[in-house]
Image (cartoon, helix red, strand yellow):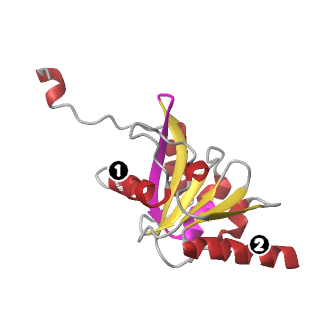
């Protein structure tokens, strides 16, 4: 490695999505206690754990863009007639911190941006964003995963989330 690259810091990329999310957080006066990016030294471990727990990896160089296509555990999904973020408070706890991550592309490579926060703040950002198309939630224990995909499906994996999605479906059908 030549001397020019030895002391180089990792490139910090601010994609349109990342910029918009931060702009919305500030405009809506959402505190960092309620919503903040996961630290640069933490997101890789979170992503590895999520992939280990929930995603079938067919080759170590695979870059997943849509985890929901390769869940390794049982999953359950429902298509929503209204935007899925309107149902989140029926399957996720409002008061606990959640891991929230959004799918994006950096230099044509799939990338997730990871955040930690409370559901009401996250819902506000989702509702106001024009960039967020597909996103995921997990508990901090990473024992379940919930996806809202670009087809307006709520897709859950992990025993607890599968049951919550099934229950939500029953409630929606009864209406």
Could you tell me which secondary element the residue under label 2 belongs to?
A: helix
Q: Residues within 10 Å of mark 2 (few under 14, many from 20)?
A: some
Check the picture and name the quadrant holding the C terminus.
Answer: bottom right
Q: Nearer the viewer, residue 5 or 18?
A: 5
Q: Is residue 63 left or right of residue 71?
A: left
Q: Residue furthest front?
A: 58
Q: Tell which circle, 2 or 1, labels the residue nearer the N-terminal end.
A: 1
Could you tell me which secondary element the residue under label 1 belongs to?
A: helix
- Give the image location of residue 144, x and y in percent: 51, 68
Say which residue label 1 marks: 44
The relative height of residue 14 versus residue 93 in the rendered view (above or below) is above
- Give the image location of residue 163, x and y in percent: 64, 76
Query: Where on the picture, by quarter, is residue 114?
Result: bottom left
Residue 123 forms part of the magenta stretch:
yes
Q: Residue at x 23, y 35 (%)?
A: 9
Query: Where on the picture, by quarter, is residue 164?
Result: bottom right
Say which residue label 2 marks: 169
In this view of the protein, can residue 89 be seen by the observer?
Answer: no
- Spatial CA distance of label 2 from label 1 is 33 Å
- Give the image location of residue 93, x and y in percent: 56, 77
Residue 100 forms part of the magenta stretch:
no
Q: Residue at x 72, y 57 (%)?
A: 153
In this view of the protein, can residue 60 be seen by the observer?
Answer: yes
Q: Residue at x 42, y 64 (%)?
A: 32
Magenta-highlighted residues: 107-124
Q: Closer to the camera: disc 2 or disc 1? A: 2
The relative height of residue 123 versus residue 167 in the rendered view (above or below) is above
Q: Which mark is residue 103?
A: none
């Amino acid at each position: 490695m030549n001397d020019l690259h030895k002391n180089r810091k990792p490139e910090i990329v601010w994609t349109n999505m990342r910029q918009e999310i931060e702009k919305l957080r500030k405009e809506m006066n959402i505190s960092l206690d309620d919503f903040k990016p996961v630290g640069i030294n933490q997101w890789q471990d979170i992503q590895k754990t999520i992939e280990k727990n929930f995603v079938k990896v067919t080759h170590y160089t695979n870059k997943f863009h849509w985890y929901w296509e390769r869940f390794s555990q049982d999953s359950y999904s429902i298509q929503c007639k209204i935007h899925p973020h309107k149902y989140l408070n029926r399957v996720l706890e409002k008061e606990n911190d959640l891991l929230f991550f959004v799918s994006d592309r950096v230099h044509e490579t799939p990338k997730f941006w990871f955040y930690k926060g409370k559901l009401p703040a996250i819902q506000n950002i989702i509702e106001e964003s024009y960039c967020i198309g597909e996103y995921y939630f997990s508990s901090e224990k990473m024992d379940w995963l919930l996806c809202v995909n670009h087809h307006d499906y709520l897709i859950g994996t992990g025993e607890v989330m599968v049951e919550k999605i099934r229950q939500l479906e029953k409630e929606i059908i009864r209406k």
